[in-house]
Image: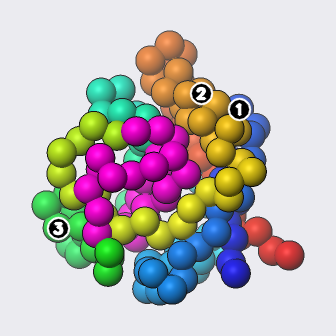
Amino acid sequence: MKKIKLTFPNGTAVLATLLEEEEPELSASLWEFAEDPEPLICHNTLSTGFSFPAFRRPSRSPNTESHLANPIGRNKVGYTSLKAGDLLWSGTKLYVVYGFCTEPSIAGAVTARVDPEYLDLLIKAGEDVWNHTYYYHKLAVLNVSREEN
């Protein structure tokens, strides 16, 4: 069972388990991405519920495989079906869910899930990311790495 660690701007760290059986390709891609600690830029829209996308540095070639109109994954779900702790990886962004979502469209595939013992920490850290945009007006950076046993 492979795990990744998310470290939020406020220093909170949570562990998430990759869903290798449900989404083997996306799980493998996220595991490969997290080989070295990677910073992601968080962008909270403030109006779509308790979630935010965290973007990696763009590659030189555009990602034409996954976008809002055509998300990738074996088991695509809608935003309103997502639950706190769900993580969706598209190859270019990690979508972090820390509560309910209000978007009426398809989100993509849940690739990892925050371990239950970390959910309360995730919710507080997610609120802090929201505060970075709304109150502090400062860039929030989420760090993703492998959790090696």
Determine whether, in the image, residue 141 is placed left or right of residue 86: right
In the rendered structure, does residue 94 fall within the stretch colored magenta? yes
Say which quadrant the C terminus sits in: bottom right
Q: Who's the residue at 27% across and 37% down the image?
A: 102
Q: Which residues are magenta?
A: 76-100
Q: CA distance from mark 1 to mark 3?
A: 33 Å
User: Residue under circle 2?
Assistant: 128
User: Residue under circle 1?
Assistant: 10
Determine whether, in the image, residue 10 is placed left or right of residue 95: right
Tag 2's secondary structure? Answer: helix
User: Residue under circle 3?
Assistant: 70
Q: Who's the residue at 47% across and 38% down the image?
A: 99
The location of residue 144, given as percent across then percent down, is: 63, 58
Q: Are marks 2 and 1 in contact (CB under 8 Å)?
A: yes
Q: Earlier in the sequence, mark 2 or mark 1?
A: 1
Determine whether, in the image, residue 149 is placed left or right of residue 16: right
Tag 3's secondary structure? Answer: loop
Tag 1's secondary structure? Answer: loop
Q: Earlier in the sequence, mark 1 or mark 3?
A: 1
Question: As rendered, which of 61 and 4 lies closer to the eye?
Answer: 4
Q: Who's the residue at 75% across and 38% down the image?
A: 11
Q: CA distance from mark 2 to mark 1?
A: 7 Å
State whether residue 91 is above or below residue 106: below
